Image (cartoon, rainbow, N blue to C red):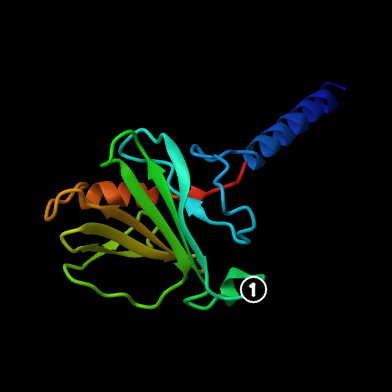
Amino acid sequence: MKYKRMSLILLLFILYLSACNQNDEHPYAQNIEGIDDFPYEFKLPTHMPYEVERVKLFHYDQRTEELPEKSSELEPLDFNLEISLLGTSEEEIVITQIEPELGNRTGSNEQQLELSNGTEAKYFYNGSSQILTWNDSGLSYDIIVYLPEQDNELYSVEELIKIANSFATYYRP
């Protein structure tokens, strides 16, 4: 009888943990107006180098009449989704751009990098913006920092990698 009771308690505890894990809310979970019908799961960072005040839709462009059911069937120009994570000052804005997986991008001042999970990433700096880009699960992710002062990088490459390593599935509230 003692073992049955312990088994029941253990089972209830496992069910409780399972339910908690399914409802884990993204730390910046907010109702992002304008993407209610966006059909794919996507990721956003859980770490930012500043206190996030607001998360908002920066830009959304669907270039095809109807998106396919599966993200694996997307074409490179089907859509472009940009979400901004805003702090309290003008400098505290990082844009996360999400698109269908793109091919091999190149740019000036390119650096090849690797994220903590082994994913290859590229860093670009062009004097007016910093961009860290990589592909994940059929989607292309860019961290874009528009620079308030020309030719002055706002964040180190290491800080941008730290942000990229923190990306987690954004479960909408």
Asked if residue 137 can be seen in this view, the reply is no
Task: Residue 98 in the image: state x and y as whole percent.
Answer: 45, 61
Crowding at dot 1, Cα within 10 Å, few <14 / some 14-19 / many 20+, comes out as few
Residue to which mark 1 is pinned: 66
- Residue at image position (34%, 77%) is 104
Which residue occupies the extreme top position in the image? 2
Q: Residue 171 versus residue 89: which sits nearer the camera?
A: 89
Please indicate whether residue 69 sits to the left or right of residue 5 in the image: left
> Which residue shows up at 42% across the image and 74% down it?
102
Residue farthest left in this picture: 151
Tell me if residue 12 can be seen: yes
Q: Amino acid at mark 1?
A: Glu
**As drawn, is 98 to the left or to the right of 88?**
right
Residue at image coords 70%, 37%: 19
Residue 143 in percent (x, y) is at: 34, 56
Q: Position of residue 61 (x, y in %)?
A: 50, 66
Quadrant in which the N terminus is drawn:
top right
Compared with 148, 14 (above or below) is: above
In the rendered image, the vertical position of residue 148 relative to residue 134, given as above or below: above
Q: Nearer the viewer, residue 140 or 6?
A: 140
Q: Please provide percent x and percent y for residue 52.
A: 40, 36
Q: Residue at x 67, y 70 (%)?
A: 69
Q: Quadrant of the C terminus?
A: top right
Quick one: SS at disc 1? loop
Front in this rendered view, residue 68 or 1: 68
The answer to whether 145 appears left or right of 148 in the picture is right
